[in-house]
Image (cartoon, helix red, strand yellow):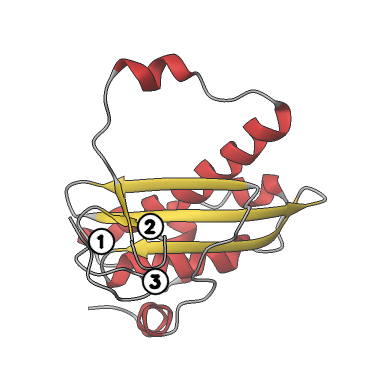
Amino acid sequence: MYSEKVMDHFSNPRNAGVIENADGMGEVGNPVCGDMMTFYIKVEDEKLADVKFQTFGCVAALAVSSIVSEMAKGKTLKEAKAITKKAAAEALDGLPKEKMHCSNLGAKALAEAIANYEEKRDGKPRAVAKQTKRKRPKRHITCSHCDVKNPVTANFCMSCGEKMDH
C-alpha cells in the first residue's frame, strides 16, 4: 500500500520538533480524518535555515510532513512556496489515492508558515476582523507536564507522552 520512501519517512521522520522563537508558524488540519500539522520555520537571508514540524495523524501525514520539511530546508522563500502537493507525493514515490489529501496538508502548512513570516516581516498581520467574527473551536490543549501544545483529540502528549487532562 505505501512505498518504501513513505515507510522510511514514517519510521524515521526528519526535522520533527519545534523551533523556539520561530520566524513563522503554519498550522493546518483536516477535521474529516483528524490529521493536524504545524510547521515552524527559521529564516536567514530570505532562505529557510531550519524547518521543523509537529504532526498528529496517519502514516501518510507524518511521511508528508517529513518530506516537505526536507524539500524546503535551505530553499529560498520563493522556492519553498513553489512546493506543491504533487511534488510532495512524487518525492515519496506516490501515495494511495485516499491519502493524497495529506500531501495537500503538508504543502499548505509550509505555505502558512511562510505567509506568517512574511506578514510579520512586512508588518502586515492578517485581517483580524475575519477571525473575530466566528468563534473557532479549541484546537489545542497544553500539556501540564511539559507545556507543549497538542491537538485537543490527543490522549497523550506528543512530546513527553504524559496522559492529557481534558
Q: Pointer 3: what residue? A: 159
Q: In the rendered structure, which amino acid carries the disc numbered 3?
A: Ser
Q: Residues within 10 Å of mark 1 (few under 14, many from 20)?
A: some
The answer to which quarter of the image holds residue 97 is bottom left
- Using residue 124 as the reference point, say whether residue 37 is left or right of it: left
- Location of residue 129 in the rendering, given as x and y in whole percent from the top left corner: 43, 14
Q: Could you tell me which residue is drawn at 39 percent across and 17 percent down?
A: 130
Tell me if label 1 and label 2 are in contact, CB under 8 Å: yes
At mark 2, the secondary structure is helix
Q: In the rendered structure, which amino acid carries the disc numbered 1?
A: Lys
Q: CA distance from mark 2 to mark 3?
A: 23 Å
Q: Which mark is residue 99?
A: 1
Q: Pointer 2: what residue? A: 103
Tell me if label 2 and label 3 are in contact, CB under 8 Å: no
Q: Could you tell me which residue is drawn at 72 percent across and 28 percent down?
A: 122
Q: Residues within 10 Å of mark 3 (few under 14, many from 20)?
A: some
